[in-house]
Amino acid sequence: MLLTARYVLPVSSPHIEYGGVLVEGDTIVEIGTAEELKTAHPEEEVVDLGLAALMPGFVDLHTHLEFSAMRGLVDDRPYSEWKMQLLSMEQRLSPEDWEDAALLGALEAVQSGITTVADITDTGASARAAVAAGLRAFIYREVSTMERPHIGPVMDAAMEDMAAWRDLNGPRLTVGIAPHGPYTCHPELLSRVSELAMAEDLPVSMHLAGSRDEYDFVKYGSSRLAVDYRDRFSRPEVGWLPTGVSPVRYVLQWGILDVPNMLAVHCTQVDDDDVDILAEHDIAIAHCPRCNAKLGMGMAPLASFLDHDIRVGIGTDSPASNNTLDMFDEMRIGLLLQRAVAGHARFYPASQFVKMATLGAAEALGIQDEVGSLEPGKQADIIGVEMSHTHQVPTQQPYSTLVHTANQENVLFTMVGGDVLYQGEEWRTLDPERVLIRAEEMRDKLRS
């Protein structure tokens, strides 16, 4: 199959006008101008997208697909209040609800041009939804407990679940583990996760230094997380002594930062010493600018991360926190926030945020040799993005057009490993009608 469009954006090399991408099976074979490729391969079926961009699919570095049914139900609340409301709502959902909520998230991801997700779950619904949709996925089994006697059973249950997810036989599925965060994990649990991950070469993801309340709880033992959250959702007799250090320095003591394939999520509340530690341990970071801004969590020091050669990619987080899995919005708002704060001193180009949403995120997961850019030999994870609307033409700079004018509704098709999952408002792997009906049923249950 020969895909052609006005623009081809390899990300790892300059863009090509009136370009094409030749796909055979699950692999990109050749990239060049459309005219050259048509001449060299006259027998190939040509799919011409016209005034559009062909680019690598988005690698969403942090998701919770199974929270998609909670979209918009907990808005206009700061992080700790949002977290408490979300935990209350979780208790109303049945196992079947979690499954269909994750399918709703997968449906949106595919339509939005997301081809790889890095998802944290404790139900496994996201794993099954990703496999059903045909997505490439890193699925992390979430673990948490502040009670030492519970650590063994928690880890046993996690290992049992991870084994079951591997049995799904998803060829694009990688299973990992995720200690939730410093304020929900006993230090020995962090050590156990670290030992298991290094023994079995498991990828690890963890929410870290994501809010001021988390920072104050870890360092001073006093915040809404220490009072309202723990009294309501945890056993109040489980004590917590102030550590006197930042969340990053706290988890450093328990070995979790020694894991070779470690992804830290958010990292908005970090100082220079924390960034040095993250860099020294080669920790990758999932940057979620919309969620961080919407919940008042703070803004990650992106310039410092990049100056320390830390691998950084973009994540959307869950629709419960930022409402959509729209990577275009994520790039745009992330870019504008950084420009507003840094001014002329650090004026990021649009292309840098496109790279963080594709190749940079792939590097964070350690799969940059497979996906993240359009290069011969890589997997054919490709999307087409329309650029012909009145709010987009005339196009001059395709990267700027993507970041400043496009949205998830402009995605024309989504291909993963050479398989077309979505094209022309049609899903090839999922049943949108059934999933959307179930979404309304879940919405009614959550509102009651």
Image: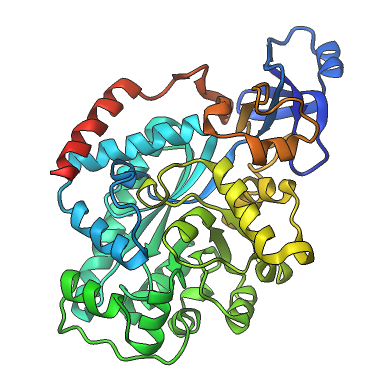
- Vertically, is 269 above or below 46? below
Q: In this view, does 423 lie to the left or right of 25?
A: left
Q: In this view, does 190 lie to the left or right of 423?
A: left
Please give the name of the residue rendered at 54% of the width and 63% of the height, measured from the top-left corner: 261
- Vertically, is 150 above or below 100? below
**Nearer to the camera, 207 or 446:** 446
Please give the name of the residue rendered at 33% of the width and 42% of the height, measured from the top-left corner: 68
- Vertically, is 423 above or below 287? above
Q: Where is residue 26 in the image (x, y as percent from the top left)?
A: 60, 28
Q: Where is residue 103 in the image (x, y as percent from the top left)?
A: 33, 35
- Vertically, is 319 above or below 183? above
Residue 10: tell me if it is visible: no
Please give the name of the residue rendered at 66% of the width and 66% of the height, measured from the top-left corner: 310
Instruction: Locate residue 381: give its quadrant.
Output: top right
Q: Quadrant of the N terminus?
A: top right
Residue found at the far top of this picture = 43
Residue 384: tell me if it is visible: yes
Q: Position of residue 57 (x, y in %)?
A: 60, 36
**Nearer to the camera, 296 or 311:** 296
**Nearer to the camera, 395 or 219:** 395
Residue found at the far left of this picture = 448
Q: Where is residue 443 in the image (x, y as percent from the top left)?
A: 22, 38
Q: Is residue 198 left or right of residue 97?
A: right
Instruction: Locate residue 34: give its quadrant.
Output: top right
Instruction: Locate residue 160: give its quadrant.
Output: bottom left
Give the number of marks: 0
Q: Quadrant of the C terminus?
A: top left
Q: In this view, does 340 lie to the left or right of 234?
A: right
